[in-house]
């Protein structure tokens, strides 16, 4: 697979046999080692690259000769990350960004203009709602927010100016699943593109490109890194889209992935499949246990058979539910927030943080953190109550996390 961004085709790629498994690509895909023969990928901490003469510099800056030029838009370490993630997602190309939200911003700047229209799930991450609904609107891009799970609502929202459909699957934090194939068909019938945020599953569990999606969005901060070390993002798509639409914007605007962060996430990709399967299995155990707790009114997890999109999730996500669970505490409406806080504050092992995708289990109250800047009406539309708690399962011993949550749950009277 070629990469039209910071790894020019004229620079050699690592030689791998055709048809190797994605788990092998996760360890081996990238650039050949330098003249020193390093086995671990090199970290190129340089802002610029030296040219042999002025004529060569001019040719490289004019894209007449392929080479690494300036780390805002071309760096070998970033290129290695991009090549590896593209191979794992099954796309032709990838472009690294400074964060997951930068990846979405780049997508909007690359594909949309004043007068264009977007159809977006109403259940996506709070900052994504803010970016489409508020920031892009300043520049004349209108967005309709619709039910994540109702393809008819997506179809009904299409206008002659619709250029992009945007979804997460599963969503943050209610783990709602969209039918990627159905949305791809709706988008393509309208002459639009479908972008899918694959943060919760990663290519270890789900490859949206195989179901018709055109663009894959990643927050590398989450499972791609896997240990909560750095902030990163990426967009995976066709070579033509990356080269012709995304690269010019990134080269000018500079929402670039740093070489160090790219190197950290690159190494995280090597263990991605092992971590995702293990964390999904542990999350399944925790979700089933939470269902049995009298202080819990509902558990949201795609691996549970009573999840509204359970069968679809199992088909799209390689038979796994993922590592994120959310659950509702029982309480009167005026007590929901207080009781949710009580459960969270009693934990002694879980990390109280809105981040996820770590080897450490994290816990948060979405209504006041990840979705805290939304209006109450927007939260209600997304189904996010004051009694909702999100847990992103790490790699700890499951009974230890159960005991940690029970410290808070047992302090509540069963409803």
Image (spheres, rainbow, N blue to C red):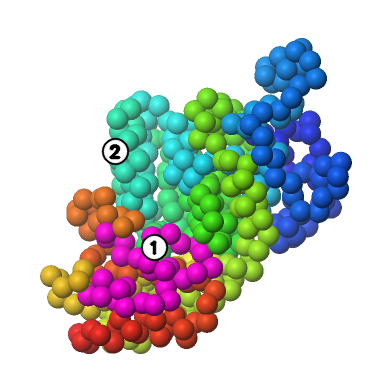
In three-dimensional space, the C-alpha distance between marks 1 and 2, rounded to whole angstroms, equals 25 Å
User: Who's the residue at 65% across and 63% down the image?
Assistant: 271
- Reading the image, the residue beneath label 2 is 134
Q: Which residues are magenta?
A: 339-368
Question: Label 2's element?
Answer: helix
Question: Could you tell me which residue is drawn at 67 percent across and 17 percent down?
Answer: 62
Nearest to viewer (mark 1 / mark 2): 1
Q: Looking at the image, is 257 positioned above or below residue 23? A: above
Marks counted in the figure total: 2
Asked whether 8 or 316 is in front, the reply is: 8
Relative to 377, 249 lies left or right: right
Secondary structure beneath dot 1 equals loop
- As for residue 147 lying within the magenta part, the answer is no
Q: Which mark is residue 353?
A: 1
User: Mark 1 and 2 residues: CB-CB less than 8 Å, in contact?
Assistant: no
- The label shown at residue 301 is none
Given residues 249 and 312, the one toward you in this image is: 249
Q: Is residue 62 left or right of residue 283?
A: right
Instruction: Please tell me whether residue 92 is drawn above or below residue 23 in the rendered image.
Output: above
The foreground one among 186 and 209 is 209
Q: Position of residue 285 (x, y in %)?
A: 48, 82
Name the one closer to the observer, 77 or 47: 47
Task: Give neighbour class at mark 1: few <14, some 14-19, many 20+ (Cα, 10 Å).
Answer: some
* Upstream in sequence: badge 1 or badge 2: 2
């Amino acid at each position: 697979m070629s990469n039209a961004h910071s790894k020019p085709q004229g620079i050699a790629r690592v030689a791998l046999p055709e048809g190797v498994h994605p788990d092998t690509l996760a360890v081996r895909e990238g650039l050949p080692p330098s003249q020193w023969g390093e086995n671990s990928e090199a970290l190129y901490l340089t802002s610029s690259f030296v040219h042999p003469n002025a004529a060569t510099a001019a040719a490289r800056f004019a894209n007449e000769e392929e080479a690494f030029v300036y780390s805002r838009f071309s760096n070998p370490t970033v290129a290695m990350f991009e090549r590896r993630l593209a191979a794992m997602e099954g796309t032709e190309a990838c472009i690294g960004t400074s964060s997951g939200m930068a990846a979405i911003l780049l997508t909007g700047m690359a594909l949309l203009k004043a007068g264009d229209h977007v159809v977006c799930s109403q259940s996506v991450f709070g900052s994504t709602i803010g970016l489409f609904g508020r920031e892009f609107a300043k520049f004349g891009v209108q967005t309709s927010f619709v039910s994540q799970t109702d393809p008819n609502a997506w179809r009904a929202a299409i206008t002659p100016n619709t250029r992009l459909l945007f979804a997460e699957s599963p969503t943050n934090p209610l783990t709602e699943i969209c039918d990627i194939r159905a949305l791809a068909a709706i988008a393509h019938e309208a002459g639009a593109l479908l972008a899918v945020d694959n943060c919760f599953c990663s290519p270890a569990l789900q490859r949206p490109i195989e179901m018709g999606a055109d663009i894959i969005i990643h927050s590398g901060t989450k499972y791609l890194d896997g240990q909560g070390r750095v902030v990163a993002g990426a967009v995976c798509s066709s070579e033509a889209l990356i080269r012709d639409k995304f690269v010019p914007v990134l080269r000018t605007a500079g929402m670039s992935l740093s070489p160090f962060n790219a190197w950290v996430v690159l190494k995280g990709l090597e263990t991605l499949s092992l971590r995702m399967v293990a964390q999904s299995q542990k999350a399944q155990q925790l979700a089933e246990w939470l269902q049995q707790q009298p202080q819990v009114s509902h558990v949201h997890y795609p691996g549970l058979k009573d999840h509204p999109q359970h069968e679809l999730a199992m088909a799209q996500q390689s038979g796994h539910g993922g590592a994120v669970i959310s659950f509702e505490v029982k309480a009167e409406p005026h007590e929901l927030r207080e009781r949710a806080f009580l459960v969270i504050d009693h934990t002694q092992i879980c990390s109280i943080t809105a981040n996820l995708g770590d080897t450490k289990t994290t816990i948060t109250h979405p209504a006041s953190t990840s979705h805290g800047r939304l209006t109450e009406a927007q939260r209600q539309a997304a189904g996010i109550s004051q009694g909702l708690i999100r847990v992103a399962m790490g790699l700890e011993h499951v009974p230890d996390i159960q005991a940690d949550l029970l410290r808070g749950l047992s302090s509540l009277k069963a409803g």
